[in-house]
Structure formats: C-alpha cells, structure tokens
Amino acid sequence: MDTNETMNVSNLSLKLFVILSRAYRSVNERVEEDVKGYGLNLTEFAVLELLYHKGDQPIQHIGKKVLLSSGSITYVVDKLEKKNFLVRKPCPKDRRVTWASITEEGTKFMNEIFPKHQRAIEEIVGGLDEKEKEEMMGLLKKLGYHAESL
C-alpha cells in the first residue's frame, strides 16, 4: 500500500468511527428519553428488563450482563428495591451470593411499559428495513468481535 492508500484507509476508519459514535449517541438519546418517561434511568431499566426476561440473577453477575461496575449495580439495585420493583434474596447454597428477584409490582410495571418501549425501539431504528437491520447486526458483531480480539 502506498502512502495515499494508507491515508485513505485511515481516513475511512476515522470516518466510520465518527459516524458510528454519532449514530449510537442519537439512538441512545432517543431510548433514554423513552425510558425516562417511565420514571427510570437506563441502568435501572436494563436491570429490571434483565430480571423481567431472564428471571432471578445473582447480583454479582448482573453487572456483566448490563455492562455496569459492581459499585454501580449495588446503587441501582438499592434504587429498584426502594421502588419495590425487586428484592434481594440470599442464595440457599452459598451465603456469599445474593440474588435479585423482580417483585410482583415490578412484573406488573414491566407488563405495562415493555410493549410501549418495544414500539419506541421499533420507531427509533425504523430508518432501516428488515434486510438492512440484519446486515447491520452482522457487521456490528463482526466489528465488535474484531475489536475485542485486539
């Protein structure tokens, strides 16, 4: 590759990064607006949604699944517990482990808001047709796996 080709590849990579960052920010801002309309922040929603769809989770593992530090998870779990959306349960097999469990009130709340949230997501990513969404998912996975491997 000559210097011009290298520069073009670099410029293209930088351009892709900027476009990807801006697109993520725009999409994320719309999602955040939707979630705030339900009285939650994104991390509270992510934890509640995880428990709603996947059932009880060890608190120590929630952070990995919703990309939060352990200190942040404790704070979010405390907030959701105060709202009566989840409870902590000790693990019967290992006293060092505490589980988070969605409450009946939390389930009722998610039953009400999740379909609305799902429609909002469909609208937010509605700029792409089904084929483009499939293609985008494949490309983003490929990019993510490559970045992870470095």
Image (tube, rainbow, N blue to C red):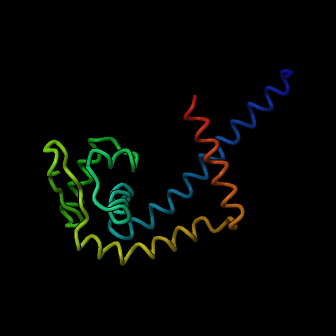
Image quarter hosting the C terminus: top right
User: What residue is at 28 percent from the left and 41 percent from the top?
Assistant: 70
In the depicted structure, whether residue 115 falls above or below residue 66: below
Residue at the extreme front: 93
Q: Quadrant of residue 147?
A: top right
Image coords of residue 99 (percent x, y): 22, 53
- Considering depth in this image, is 124 or 112 the residue closer to the camera? 112
Apparent side of residue 81 relative to residue 129 in the rendered image (left or right): left
Q: Quadrant of residue 115?
A: bottom left
Apparent side of residue 71 relative to residue 136 in the rendered image (left or right): left
Image coords of residue 89 (percent x, y): 16, 56
User: What residue is at 31 percent from the left and 62 percent from the top?
Assistant: 55
Total marks drawn? 0
Image coords of residue 32 (percent x, y): 44, 60
Image quarter hosting the N terminus: top right
- Considering depth in this image, is 90 or 2 the residue closer to the camera? 90
User: What residue is at 23 percent from the left and 57 percent from the top?
Assistant: 79
User: What residue is at 37 percent from the left and 44 percent from the top?
Assistant: 64
In the depicted structure, whether residue 47 falls above or below residue 69: below
Image coords of residue 67 (percent x, y): 40, 46
Q: Quadrant of residue 53?
A: bottom left
In the depicted structure, whether residue 141 falls above or below residue 11: below
